[in-house]
Image (cartoon, grey):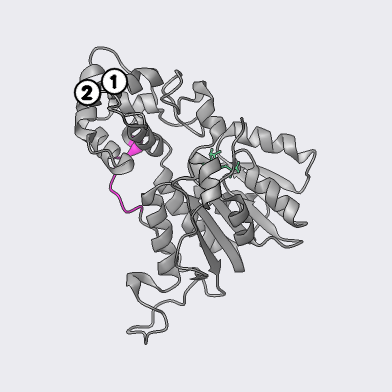
Amino acid sequence: MGHVPVLLDEVVTAMAPRDGDVLVDATFGGGGYARALLAAADCRVIGIDRDEDAIARAEAFVSEQPRLIPLQGRFGEMDRLLRGAGFEHVDAITLDLGVSSFQLDQAERGFSFMRDGPLDMRMGRSGPSAADVVNQLDERDLATIIFRLGEEKQSRRIARAITGRRLKAPFTSTLDLAGLIEQTLGGRRGSRTHPATRSFQAIRMFVNDELGELARALVASEELLREGGRLVIVTFHSLEDRMVKLFMRERAGLQGGGSRHLPQQEAGPQPSFEMPSKKAIEPSPAELKTNPRSRSSRLRVAIRTDAPAMALPVSTGVDLPDLGQVEVAS
Ligand SMILES: C[S@@+](CC[C@H](N)C(=O)[O-])C[C@H]1O[C@@H](n2cnc3c(N)ncnc32)[C@H](O)[C@@H]1O
C-alpha cells in the first residue's frame, strides 16, 4: 500500500490554497498533500523531496497535472532551490517530517527493523549511511545519538553492545543490528513496540541530519513567504515539535511565555509571524483509529507578517556528534 497522508484535511485548510497561488510541498513523498492542494484551487505546487524515488513519482504525475513542479533537493536549502527555479516568494509552505511508507516498505532502503536490507537509511542516497555511522562512531557518540534522538534509556548498553560486536564483524544489514539490540535488551518483554524502534529512529535522524534540516528550513521559510503566507508543519517527534513551537513563538514575539500585548521592556524586532493558535492541532480520534502512523503527529501553523525576516539562526536544541566525521565507506 502507498503512503496514507497524516492530518491531510487539516493541512489543506491551514494552507488555504487560492487560485493563482504558488505553494510549496517541501516533503512530496507520495504526493498526498500536493494532490489535495492542486485539487483545492487553480494553484501551482512546487513538490520538493531529497529522495529521487519521490521525485520520479512527482515527475510521472506532471503529465496528468502540469501545475505540479517537482524539485529534487533538501528542504534545508529550499531558498536556493526555489530561487534557482525562478521563485523569489511563495504563498504557503508545508513540511510533513520523517519518512514515507514508500521508504519504510522498501527493504533495500534499510529503514526498517522488520525487513532485511542493507543498513542504509539515507533519504537522499549521498553521504554516510547508517552502517557507516554504527561501524565508525565511538561508543560515547553512539550512546549520545541513541539517547538524545531516540529517547532510549538503555542507550549506553546498546552502544556498548554495538561497539563490542563490530570488532568481530562490521554491521551491514538491518536485521543484524535489530537482532543485536533485541538480544541486548532481552527481547520484547510483552511490549508492542520492537526493542530496536527507538535506536533505528535515532540513527535515521542522525544519518539524514533531520534536526539540522528543519532548523535551516524554518529560517528559509521566513525569507520565502510573502505577507500573509502560511507555514504549516507536521512533526512526529517531540524535539521537532519543540523546535517548531519555539521558532514560531520567537518570531511572533511570544517567547518566554509572555504576551506581545504586554508593554515591551525593550523594543525588539517586529514579529515576522503571527500564530493563529498557540496550540498544536492533533489527529482526530477517527484518524487515530484508521492511521496508526498519525499517533504522534502535531500540526503547527504560523502566518507571515509584513515585517522583515529576523534571519536569526534556529537551534536544534540538542548537542550531537558531527556527521562530518563519519567517512563514506559502504
Ligand atoms: C512523511 S513523508 C511525506 C508524505 C507526503 N506528505 C504525502 O502525503 O505523501 C516525508 C518525505 O519527506 C522527504 N524528506 C525528509 N527530509 C527531507 C529533507 N530534508 N529535504 C527534502 N525532503 C525530505 C522524505 O524523503 C519523504 O519522502
Residue occupying the point 53% across, 75% down: 307
On the picture, is 296 further left or further right than 326? Answer: right
Residue reaching furthest bottom? 263
- Magenta span: chief secondary structure: loop
Question: How far apart are labels 2 and 1 at the CA level?
Answer: 8 Å
Q: Is mark 2 within 8 Å of ligand 1?
A: no
> Relative to residue 305, is residue 142 drawn left or right?
left
Left or right of residue 216: residue 51? right
Was residue 281 drawn as part of the magenta stretch in this picture?
A: no
Identity, as a three-letter code, of the amino acid under mark 2: Ala
Q: Is residue 224 depicted above or below 293 in this figure?
A: below
Question: Pointer 2 and pointer 1: residues touching (CB < 8 Å)?
Answer: yes
The three-letter code of the residue at mark 1 reads: Leu
Mark 1, secondary structure of its residue? helix
Percent from the top left, x then y, of residue 186? Answer: 23, 23
- Residue with the mark numbered 2: 161
Please state the horizontal and vertical placement of residue 323, each as a whole percent of the image. Answer: 35, 37
Residue that appears at 30% across and 50% down: 318
Residue 320 lies in the magenta-colored region: yes
- Residue 93 is situated, as x and y percent measured from the top left of the image, at 59, 56
Using the rendered view, name the quadrant where residue 322 is placed: top left
In this rendered view, identify the residue nearer to me: 329 or 69.
69
In what quadrant does ligand 1 lie?
top right
* Circle 2 SS class: helix
Q: Which residues are magenta?
A: 316-324
- Bin the neighbour count of mark 1 within 10 Å (Cα to Cα): few under 14, some 14-19, many 20 and up: some
Which tag, 2 or 1, sits closer to the chain's start? 2
Q: Give me the residue at 27% from left, 30% from top.
A: 137
